[in-house]
Image: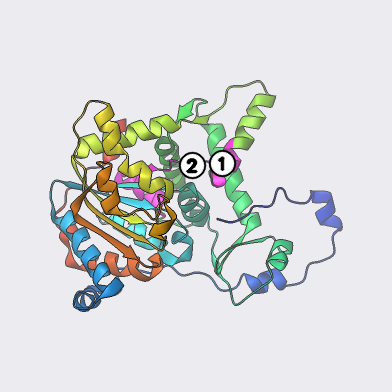
Amino acid sequence: MFQRRASKVRETEAMNAPVPNNQKAELLQNVVEHVDITSYDARPIIDSMRKMSFSSRDTARAADIFNMALADKGCSTWLILAGSTSAGGCMHVYRDMVKNGMIDAVVATGASIVDMDFFEALGFKHYQAAGPVDDNVLRDNYIDRIYDTYIDEEELQACDHTILEICNRLEPRGYSSREFIWEMGKWLSEGNAKKEGSLIQTAYEEGVPIFCPAFVDSSAGFGLVKHQKEKIAEKAPYLMIDAVADFRELTDVKIAAGTTGLFMVGGGVPKNFAQDTVVCAEILGVEADMHKYAIQITVADVRDGACSSSTLKEAASWGKVSTTYEQMVFAEATTVVPLIASDAYHREAWKGREKPRWNKLFGK
């Protein structure tokens, strides 16, 4: 997603360095503002798209399928999240979907949850690029880039060290990513959040589990590595992330839920991880239904043979997704996710849903 510099200059070098110019401040002046799905009503747009063709009609059908899943009282809806839409302005969309009972479980990349959501919960920001800038200039100013979005690397390293602090206060043993993220939400709720209402804190308060099957591919990884290196040097026990527990726990949620619906933004590991719970249940001797409802928003090319671009119809051949209520939307996600989510919010099918609070399966 973006490159991280190996280390900061030593404090003595920084003290002797010349006073920097204001170039970094100029580059980091336009803050990314997150869209609020409650502030506008997308229903007329979706209704119009339903009468159109191409990606517009696909988007409208995806919205219809999501609303069907919400109206199905026996269905548990999961948010599957990959890519950088949280940094790009959709962070509050996902938070509000959880807060309003539209989402019962989250499967995401570590970067989406830690480097973006937890990062902002610590009071840091993402910034819009004003125009083309030499990436070597960004590197000199300690700025990381995601397409047209900037992140202050020094702030990211502060996020890394916060993860280290959380590690050091926990019992040294194996944790699933869900359990560790629950601890992060707890830490934020104890008065440590500089920005209230992050996805992590909201999920903690709502009893919604968050799974990151590639958790260490994020700021969490840097903090965890530093924690382990320090404990190894002390010849002391250390904390670790149990990836097998992740798969087992999400499969437990699938088995308990029965009927499920997937709202997928991007693809990659989160997509396959969520879909594979049906197969895992079968291996465990449990006959679990394929995911009944599924929409995926992606720009991945189906010709490359990758998981991110594989269609939901293809997933049916693996016994993962039913093809009755499935829809691929080939669009850049920040352009359509706010429309689909706002449409669902204002149609209010979520108001009749009972929140399952799947964290209760794990005593949380």
Amino acid type at circle 2 is Phe
Residue 228 in sight from this viewpoint: yes
Picture residue at 23% right of the left edge, 73% below the top: 46
Query: Badge 1 is on which residue?
Result: 221
Q: Mark 2 — residue?
A: 215
Which quarter of the rendering shows the N terminus?
Answer: bottom right
Quadrant for residue 19, please give it: bottom right
- Residue at the front extreme? 303
- Give how far apart the Cα atoms at labels 2 and 1 are: 7 Å
Q: Are marks 2 and 1 in contact (CB under 8 Å)?
A: yes
Magenta stretch: includes residue 209: yes
Q: Is residue 57 magenta?
A: no
Residue 253 is tagged as none
Q: Is residue 127 left or right of residue 78?
A: right
- Which segment is the magenta one? 198-224
Residue plotted at (28% across, 42% down): 318
Q: Quadrant of residue 252?
A: top left
* Count of numbered marks: 2
